[in-house]
Image (tube, helix red, strand yellow):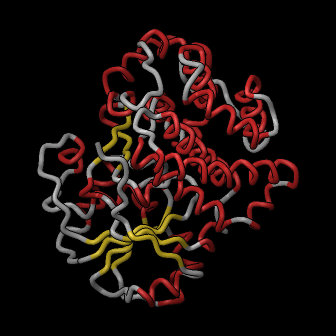
């Protein structure tokens, strides 16, 4: 039984210019990024790379339409390395562009072609949430099917993950909060995964030991406190990514996908809506063992009792951004049954990582409670 792997080399630089010099970026490099990152952090270096600005192909979550249009426009472009500089959308797109012979990304998501890596992949995250720089997973909104799908394969693992804290500085607070909450969810979901082991647990706990105190200080001091701990939070996201890249995440992510796919709710925000309700369902079914250990550890850090932990977490996170009912996003009550069916039909990859199995009706009841 495999316990742990990390194929990615992790580097850190003070500035993007330092990274560009150390990695000798040149004309054989494809950089996928955004204008709002290129202008302040990359333009001055006058790099001869081929740049793709992701937002020119659409906004919001990565989709098969967005990826395929970029693929089309890159026909005839020769490059040896793919360098992703951005948040989850840029990273998830970039991972597909290292595959050999890819002309339609659905062929990869549906596993219709062999997944063979032919380009080097370097990922520089600019949020503090996805952890995707150290995972073998790419998530996309499949608009033609009104859901999200995940591709998990070592062919899309980054060769290098590069931490540059200055790149967090331009992230608006809501996006910062949603991404950081997502990192917390990665840490705690992977701690409860059946695949959790002493190696992954170290990274889960290291992540939440950073994240929760930062959240408490933001609650007490205000949003600008985040600028005092950019390096710590991007590192915490990386720790959480290492944990869930090995142990996996479960029902929180699985239940969020139909909401995100149907109503275009950003990934971290969608996960946030389901976080504590899923954990309360787990607790009702299996309160002992790893759940009890998790509650003891988090309650001590939160300064509360294990019995009130999930309510205290809700209160803390709500001090950062509001938790919404699902109807706020446009979801209709009549969709509850269909969403539950969609999770069972399409998210078995994630449901296999549940702390304890949830039935179709239990999943439905979580949607009902949050609706």
* Residue placed most toward the observer, 69 or 310: 310
Quarter assignment of residue 232: bottom right
- Judged from this view, the residue extending furthest toward the right is 220
What percent of the width, then of the height, locates residue 40?
Answer: 59, 78
Quarter assignment of residue 327: top right
* Residue 371 visible from this viewpoint: no
What percent of the width, then of the height, locates residue 187?
Answer: 55, 45
What percent of the width, then of the height, locates residue 205?
Answer: 60, 48
Number of numbered markers:
0
19 left or right of 79 in image: right
Up-down relation of residue 187 to residue 286 (above or below): below
* Residue placed most toward the observer, 55 or 101: 101
In the picture, the quarter occupied by the N terminus is top left
What percent of the width, then of the height, locates residue 325?
Answer: 65, 24
Up-down relation of residue 37 to residue 140 (above or below): below
In the picture, the quarter occupied by the C terminus is top right
Q: Residue at x 20, y 63 (%)?
A: 117
Up-down relation of residue 154 to residue 276 (above or below): below
290 left or right of 226 in image: left
Q: Residue at x 45, y 17 (%)?
A: 358
* Residue placed most toward the observer, 329 or 358: 358
Q: Residue at x 45, y 85 (%)?
A: 20
Quarter assignment of residue 224: bottom right
* Residue 152 visible from this viewpoint: yes
Q: Residue at x 38, y 33 (%)?
A: 350
């Amino acid at each position: 039984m495999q316990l742990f792997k990390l194929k990615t080399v992790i580097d850190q630089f003070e500035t993007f210019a330092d990274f560009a010099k150390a990695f000798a970026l040149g004309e054989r490099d494809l950089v996928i990024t955004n204008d709002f990152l290129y202008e302040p952090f990359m333009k001055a270096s006058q790099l001869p790379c081929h740049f793709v600005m992701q937002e020119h192909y659409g906004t919001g979550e990565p989709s098969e339409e967005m990826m395929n249009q970029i693929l089309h426009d890159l026909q005839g472009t020769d490059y040896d390395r793919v360098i992703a500089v951005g948040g989850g959308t840029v990273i998830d797109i970039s991972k597909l562009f290292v595959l050999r012979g890819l002309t339609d990304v659905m062929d990869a998501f549906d596993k219709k072609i062999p997944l063979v890596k032919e380009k080097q992949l370097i990922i520089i995250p600019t949020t503090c949430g996805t952890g995707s720089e150290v995972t073998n997973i790419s998530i996309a909104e499949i608009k033609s099917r009104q859901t999200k799908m995940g591709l998990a394969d070592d062919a899309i693992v980054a060769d290098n993950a590069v931490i540059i804290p200055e790149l967090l500085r331009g992230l608006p607070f809501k996006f910062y909060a949603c991404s950081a909450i997502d990192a917390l969810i990665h840490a705690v979901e992977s701690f409860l995964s059946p695949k959790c082991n002493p190696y992954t647990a170290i990274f889960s706990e290291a992540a939440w030991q950073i994240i929760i105190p930062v959240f408490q200080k933001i609650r007490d001091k205000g949003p600008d406190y985040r600028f005092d701990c950019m390096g710590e939070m991007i590192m915490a996201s990386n720790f959480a990514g290492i944990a869930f890249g090995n142990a996996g995440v479960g029902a929180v992510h699985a239940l969020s996908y139909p909401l995100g796919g149907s109503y275009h709710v950003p990934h971290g925000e969608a996960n946030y809506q389901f976080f504590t309700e899923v954990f309360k369902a787990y607790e009702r079914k299996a309160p002992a063992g790893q759940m009890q250990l998790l509650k003891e550890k988090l309650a001590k850090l939160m300064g509360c009792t294990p019995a009130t932990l999930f309510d205290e977490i809700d209160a803390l996170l709500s001090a950062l951004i509001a938790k919404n009912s699902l109807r706020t996003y446009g979801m209709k009550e009549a969709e509850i049954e269909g969403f539950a069916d969609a999770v069972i039909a399409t998210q078995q990859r994630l449901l296999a990582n549940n702390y304890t199995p949830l039935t179709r009706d239990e999943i439905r009841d979580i949607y009902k409670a949050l609706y």
